[in-house]
Image: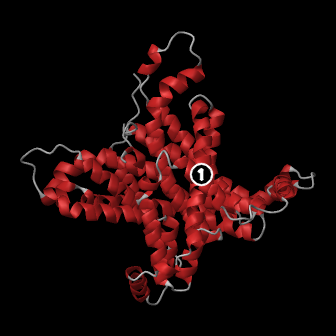
Amino acid sequence: MRLAPRVPGYRAVSGGFALAALLCLAVADLHVTTLHPFAELSRLLAGLIRPDVGSVEGWSVVYTVAFAVLGVGCGAGAGFLLAIPFAHSRIVRVTCAALRSVHELFWALLLMQVFGLSATTGVLAIALPYAGICAKVYSEIIEEADLSALRVLPPGTGAVSAFAYARLPDLAGRFADYTLYRLECGMRSSLVLGFIGLPTMGFTLESAFRQGRYAEAGALLLVFYALIGTRRLWVRRWSVPFLLVGALLALPPAIGHAAIGPSLVRFFTHDIVPAPLRGGEGTWISLWAWFRPILTDQILPGAAQTLVLAQIALVATALGALLLFPLTARRFTGPLGRPFGRVLLVVVRSTPEYMLAYLCLQLLGPSMLPAIIALSLHNAGIIGYLMGRHADAIPYRPDAPRGLNLYAYETLPRLYGQFLAFLLYRWELILRESAIFGILGVTTLGFYVDAAISELRLDVAVVLIAATALMTMAVDALSRALRRGLRITDLPTRLSDQA
């Protein structure tokens, strides 16, 4: 008799992740190296309380929105086309996984070698990974849709007509909700692109932080939060054509290098080709001699540091979400406190992790600690916000306890499966973000990618980015396997599903 494989339970998975995080803490660099972090923090808070709104450069706001609108528009359009064959084509699925596994900052660093610091770089850096993300999510929405409309179609209806007239009308609302959420993510990505030189709000924000102009930084943050908070007001069905046309007209005048064609040919035929193969006389031995030090000195230590950072941040996110979600639940905070809790978590989740890490780096000095704080705050804000919405939907009995007993015995046990679904879904995203923090000096894979690009060793940079993508895809596959084992694959995991 063949025994069925043992399925891990909630306790086993939770304990395993917690134990792994404790082991990672033993080797993580968590030192605070600044002499007066609280004095710097007080100056920052003073600037946020008294923002200098007049110093905000209007064109940086316009460029932030324009890059996001065009990048998400192109990515969503390509994702929609890829979503149709997604479930039936392994090539499409692998291509989309590769696209979304590379962070926008890595795409931007590569694209700058061809298009320079231009609008083309900003738009494509957002569009490429978002095409892979949207294809996957749109495909899931298509698979989950009701098929009853197909049964009433006349015999002989073509596949295109059936999709356009029987399925698309039912799917359009969910596509729109997800695309609207993806635009919020696109604005965060657009802001972060400014930290590497593109003319979005992040460029001005980075300069303000570095020079201690916290009143200006506070004003930029408030404007950004206002953009995120009001997106449902200015992104409407009727306004989308105006936004697209306005974004095109508002792009910076220089759309790349004067000689994009030669730059593109050189990029694919020389720059990213491994050095031993450029002369056409390379051998497997010379290729291995070139690759071996990259593997031993950069990929392996960088991957180890990326995993350490991601594991600690994942468990810290879990703890933060468990502490924060009562702030948005009506049963815990009441009708007066709940709006304040929701606003707090919306602000936290709307702040890009990279910007939070940069800010914490100024306060605490270079180590893993700023990155852990940034990842934990951002993702705990997202998961806590969503769990609070689920807690509001729980039908409590009339004699339910209050306070800590309500939390520990009535609410958390009923939300724990959903909590794990959210956490495992964010695992891949946390790892993806962990890699890019190397650009800020943490020795994750991004540290070696940034160094290779700075030294114009693009062949090495591409290998390192490919290693990052493979690691992200492996974690995504493990996450999906764990969700299947825990039987929580059908629970909602996307923020747009809760909107």
| Residue placed most toward the observer, 145 or 305 | 145
Q: Residues within 10 Å of mark 1 (few under 14, many from 20)?
A: some
In the rendered image, residue 450, in percent from the top left (x then y), is placed at: 67, 68
**Residue 260 seen in render:** yes
Q: Kindly give the residue lying farthest to the top in the view shown.
A: 155
SS for dot 1:
helix
Q: Residue at x 51, y 86 (%)?
A: 212
| Relative to 34, 128 lies left or right | right
Residue 98 lies left or right of residue 493; in this view the side is right
Amino acid type at circle 1 is Leu
Q: Which residue does the image show at 88% across and 51% down from the upper left? A: 283
**Where does residue 70 sit, x and y in percent of width and height?**
61, 53
User: Within the image, what quadrant is residue 202 found in?
Assistant: bottom right
In this picture, is 197 found above or below 69?
below
Q: How many marks?
A: 1
Q: Nearer the viewer, residue 464 or 75?
A: 75
Tell me if 7 is positioned left or right of 235 in this view: left
**Horizontal placement of 159 versus 144: left or right?**
right
Nearest the camera: 40 or 167?
167
Residue 373 spot, x, y in % from top left: 43, 69
Q: Is residue 362 above or below residue 197?
A: below
Looking at the picture, does residue 482 appear above or below residue 318? Answer: above
Determine the image quadrant of residue 260: bottom right
Coordinates of residue 232 in the picture (x, y in percent): 42, 53
Name the residue carrying label 1.
Answer: 244
What colouring does the structure picture have? secondary structure
Residue found farthest to the left: 399
Q: Quadrant of the N terminus?
A: top left
Q: Is residue 305 above or below residue 358?
A: above
Q: Can residue 471 be seen from the camera position used here?
A: no
